[in-house]
Amino acid sequence: MYQNVRKVATLLDEYHKTGKIELKRVPAWGLRMPNTYYTESINAFCRENEQTGALAHSTISVAHSAIRNFLFELEDMGYVDFDRVTLPVVSECMSHTAKRYAGGLGAMLFAIRSFLRFLHRNGTTQIDLSIAMPEMVAKRRVVRQGFGTGETEKMLCSANINSSIGKRDYAIMLTAIQTGLRAVDIVNLKRQDIDWRNYEIRIIQSKTGHPLNLPLESETGNAIADYLLNGRPKCDIPFIFLCDNRPYRPLKNRSASAMISRYMQRTGIDKSDIPRRGFHSFRRSFGAGLLESEIPLDMLSELLGHTHMDSAKPYLAANELGLKSCAIGLTPTQKAGEGW
């Protein structure tokens, strides 16, 4: 109820100030924003990457957050623009910014380095401040488990397939379970991406920009067809999965992730028991299932759409049965002057 009231209040406030309403995510309450100068710099960086396609939309969103935290540190140190910012200042600022990140330092460094190079390229800074950034960071290795077979069955069974939303959610979850596609690629699925005659899904991956062809299981195809024919709102939007309330619009990553969190809560799956479980856990389960079926690693990477073989390493680490088969047994040995 609180969230609905807050959304209505935000829409009324926007209409009062601008005379129109734009459909967008309601900003977080009390969210700190950089000063106007810094905000314009971030927006210019994001616009350039959107226009050139140098970074994927999801990557730009992550980069925006990291750059904002970096600029907060600059503000706290007394810098309101880049005129007096030097290499030692950037180095000190990075030391403070890194404390905000328990993991994902590599992505944070990449974002801020790209931003500083953008500033120098556009003449905002006289020197390239990015040279003060560390060149590399030790990768944080975390073995994240996917959903078990019983857990995925519970979530599928809890979807009310007699309702339009239930049909949509069921089709999304089944697609994730049987294809291992990322959330962003599932919510971006269009009618033209499905070859019904050849039972294939053909997409360009949002994360890598590389094409990927996957087999379409009959169960997944039937679920998607049921939603398209009997649950999806009638409109000309090319995307398959839509928000159920008017005005109709494509689902976003956050909406898909929030949907899985609701089903986990509904079925009693405890997130605190195995942290960081969410939509991506379907992909983990899919990869683990391929390994248990003794699918070669190169084929696993191909099915998951990886651009590098190293991306499959987390799936190897999560394959407990496979690791046990690699363990070296204890061989009896004899010491000099002693028995076995």
Image: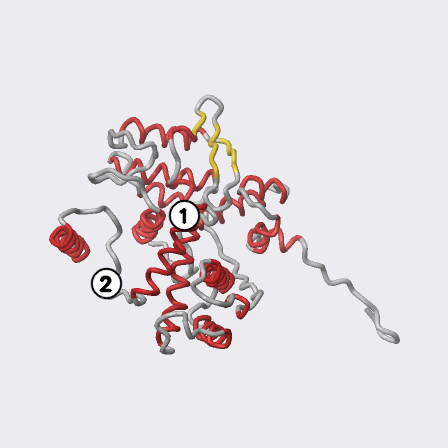
Question: Where the N terminus falls, by quadrant?
Answer: bottom left
* Residue at x-position 36% and y-position 41%: 156
**Left or right of 340: which side holds 106?**
left
Residue type at mark 2 is Trp
- In the displayed structure image, the side of residue 87 where residue 237 appears, left or right: left
User: Upstream in the sequence, badge 2 or badge 1?
Assistant: 2
Which amino acid is tagged 1? Glu
Residue 71, image x, y percentages: 38, 68
Which label sits on residue 50? Answer: 1
Between the C-alphas of marks 2 and 1, the distance is 27 Å
Horizontally, residue 264 falls left or right of residue 331, namely left
On screen, residue 327 above or below 172: below
What crowding class fits label 1: few (fewer than 14 Cα within 10 Å), some (14-19), or many (20 or more)?
some
Q: How is the image coloured?
A: secondary structure
Across and down, in percent, residue 334 comes to 83, 69
Q: Going 36% across and 48% down the picture, which residue do you hit? A: 253
Residue picked out by circle 2: 29
Residue at the farthest top position: 197
336 to 2, vertically: above or below: below
